[in-house]
């Protein structure tokens, strides 16, 4: 007899790279008739509450502490771990989940261990090519370790590992925009621009807060290209648009400089080439929209995981990688010219709509209950 998965608790503390994929799984599960809630840590909790409340998803807090070589900090972390463990037990007793899904980060360890102690099936998802230390630790008790990309460090029972991809926001997957032409018309209308369908459009961004290297190097690279046929949309991050705009004003390109923009599906559809970091969500989005890219991995990502994410997309034949330490405006200018020459045409690019990895994650969790 098949047991139905009705209630799912998702652990998605830490950064947005853990939170938003977890939120995407929760939203999809609720859309399918299930019941889901979230557990997070105190890091940017008001920001996370804003989004969870937007979709009517309950969110709980549980304490967590980082490992430290400092004896006092280690003691405080242990106290926080015990506190988070008991907080999670109380949440589980109240919510009675059928399963718990941890999205990575050290913040998931207390709640993950609480699930193990209470014999609640534990599932893990890692959003990068390098399985993180928290997931490696919890993997010995997990039913399944799902990953966004083929992992370069197994570190656990290979039979438990399944590549699902990174869960994507439903707005990206369900966008009704039909292609570049329609997207260009929407951008021109919304921002009073004159972007042409016949000219290549480059999308540039460095994450929600921007990236200093990308904001500094890429505008200068566009300037070196000295090509009036180029069109650029650059997301700078908060408070950084003025400085970036000043450089673009000295170029010949038609540019749109924004601090942020939520409808990334629209911008992906407009673009012919993307220049960005290589976080797990970003690489999955590029793959979903089949966009050629120049990837500049964030150099301080734990275990250099953004570099390995970039290598995954290079193997798809879709990207070049430039390490941050080697990133110069002249090199990026060369890469831009090379990538644009390789574009088959400037005709409308129709995305290959792969299944949202969030669907695959839910399917794999449900499979354990059969």
Image (spheres, rainbow, N blue to C red):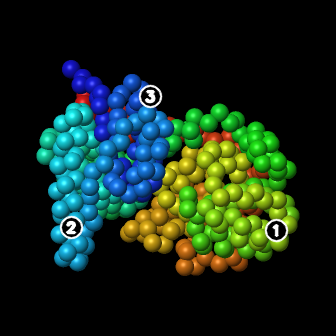
Residue 3 picture quarter: top left
Look at the picture and state if 313 lies above or below 182. below
Quadrant the N terminus occupies = top left
State the separation of the CA atoms marked 2 and 3. Answer: 40 Å
Residue at label 1? 249
* Left or right: 16 as drawn, with respect to 231: left
The image shows residue 36 at horizontal and vertical percentages of 35, 34
The local crowd at label 1, few if under 14, some if 14 to 19, many if 20 or more residues have their Cα within 10 Å, is few
Q: Secondary structure at mark 3?
A: helix
Q: Quadrant of the C terminus?
A: top left
Assess whether mark 1 and mark 2 are in contact (beta carbons under 8 angstroms). Answer: no
Which residue is at 42% across, 65% downward? 305
Estimate the x, y position of residue 105 in percent, counting from the top left: 33, 58
Residue 76 is labelled as 2
Q: Name which residue lies at 55% across and 74% down.
A: 324
Q: Residue at x 80, y 42 (%)?
A: 189
First along the sequence among labels 3 and 1:
3
The quarter of the picture where residue 205 lies is bottom right
């Amino acid at each position: 007899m098949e047991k139905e998965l009705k209630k799912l608790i998702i652990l998605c503390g830490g950064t947005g790279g853990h939170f938003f994929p977890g939120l995407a799984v929760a939203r999809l599960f609720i859309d399918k008739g299930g019941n889901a809630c979230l557990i997070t840590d105190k890091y940017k909790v008001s920001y996370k509450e804003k989004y969870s409340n937007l979709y009517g998803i309950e969110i709980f807090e549980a304490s967590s502490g980082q490992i430290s070589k400092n004896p006092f900090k280690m003691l405080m972390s242990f106290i926080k771990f015990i506190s988070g463990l008991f907080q999670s037990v109380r949440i589980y007793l109240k919510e009675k989940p059928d399963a718990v899904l941890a999205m990575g980060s050290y913040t998931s360890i207390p709640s993950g261990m609480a699930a193990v102690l209470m014999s609640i099936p534990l599932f893990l998802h890692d959003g990068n090519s390098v399985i993180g230390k928290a997931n490696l630790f919890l993997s010995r008790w997990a039913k399944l370790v799902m990953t966004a990309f083929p992992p370069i460090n197994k570190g656990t029972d290979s039979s438990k590992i399944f590549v699902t991809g990174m869960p994507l926001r439903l707005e990206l997957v369900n966008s009704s925009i039909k292609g570049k032409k329609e997207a260009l018309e929407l951008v021109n209308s919304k921002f009073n621009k004159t972007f042409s369908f016949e000219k290549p459009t480059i999308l540039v961004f460095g994450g929600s807060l921007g990236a200093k290297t990308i904001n500094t190097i890429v505008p200068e690279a566009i300037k070196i290209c000295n090509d009036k046929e180029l069109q650029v949309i650059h997301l700078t991050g908060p408070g950084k648009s003025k400085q970036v705009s000043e450089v673009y004003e000295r170029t010949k390109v038609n540019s749109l400089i924004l601090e942020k923009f939520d409808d990334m599906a629209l911008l992906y559809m407009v673009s012919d080439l993307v220049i960005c970091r290589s976080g797990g969500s970003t690489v999955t989005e590029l793959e979903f929209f089949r966009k050629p890219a120049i990837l500049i991995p964030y150099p301080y990502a734990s275990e250099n995981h953004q570099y390995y994410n970039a290598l995954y997309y290079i193997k798809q034949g879709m990207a070049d990688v430039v390490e941050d330490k080697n990133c110069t405006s002249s090199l990026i200018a060369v890469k831009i010219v090379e990538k644009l020459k390789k574009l088959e045409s400037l005709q409308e690019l129709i995305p290959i709509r792969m299944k949202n990895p969030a669907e695959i994650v839910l399917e794999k969790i449900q499979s354990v209950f059969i």
